[in-house]
Image (cartoon, grey):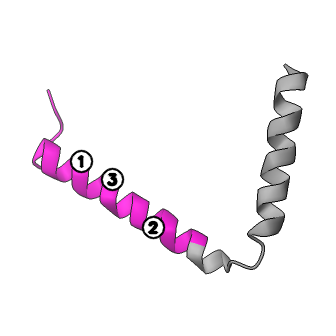
C-alpha cells in the first residue's frame, strides 16, 4: 500500500510546486464554480424537490 502511495505523493508535491504561482483565489473561484454547477444540475434534474 505504501509503495503505491509514495509515487502519487511525489507527483502531487511536484505538481504543487509547479502551480505555486497560481493565486489561491483561483482555487476558491473554481471550487465555487463547481459547487454552483452541481447545485444547478441538482435543481434542474430534481426540479427543486427531493426525489421520493
At numbered mark 1, what does the secondary structure look like: helix, strand or loop?
A: helix
**Residue 3 part of the magenta segment:** no
- Report the span colored magenta: 27-52
Q: Nearer the viewer, residue 15 or 49?
A: 15
Q: Residue at the top extreme? A: 1
Marks 2 and 3, how far apart at CA: 10 Å
Q: In the image, residue 3 lies at what x, y percent?
A: 90, 24
Mark 1 Cα shell of 10 Å, populated few (<14), some (14-19), many (≥20): some
Q: Residue at the left extreme? A: 47
At numbered mark 2, what does the secondary structure look like: helix, strand or loop?
A: helix
Mark 3 Cα shell of 10 Å, populated few (<14), some (14-19), many (≥20): few
The residue under the point 77% across, 58% down is 15
Mark 3 — residue?
Answer: 38
The residue under the point 74% across, 69% down is 19
Q: Nearer the viewer, residue 23 or 11?
A: 11
Mark 1 — residue?
Answer: 42
Q: Nearer the viewer, residue 27 or 50?
A: 27
Compared to residue 49, the image places residue 29 above or below, namely below
Q: In the image, residue 49 lies at what x, y percent?
A: 13, 43
The residue under the point 49% across, 68% down is 30
Please tell me the numbered disc located at residue 28: none
Mark 2 Cα shell of 10 Å, populated few (<14), some (14-19), many (≥20): few
At numbered mark 3, what does the secondary structure look like: helix, strand or loop?
A: helix
Q: Quadrant of the N terminus?
A: top right
Mark 2 — residue?
Answer: 32
Q: Nearer the viewer, residue 50 or 21?
A: 21
Query: In the rendered view, does 32 fall on the left or right side of 19?
Result: left
**Residue 32 part of the magenta segment:** yes
Question: Marks 3 and 1: in contact by CB < 8 Å?
Answer: yes
Q: In the image, residue 2 lies at what x, y percent?
A: 89, 24
Query: In the rendered view, does 25 fall on the left or right side of 6?
Result: left
The residue under the point 69% across, 77% down is 22
Amino acid at each position: 500500500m505504501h509503495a503505491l502511495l509514495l509515487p502519487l505523493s511525489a507527483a502531487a508535491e511536484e505538481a504543487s510546486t509547479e502551480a505555486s504561482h497560481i493565486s489561491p483565489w483561483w482555487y476558491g473561484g473554481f471550487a465555487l464554480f463547481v459547487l454552483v454547477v452541481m447545485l444547478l444540475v441538482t435543481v434542474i434534474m430534481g426540479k427543486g424537490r427531493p426525489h421520493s
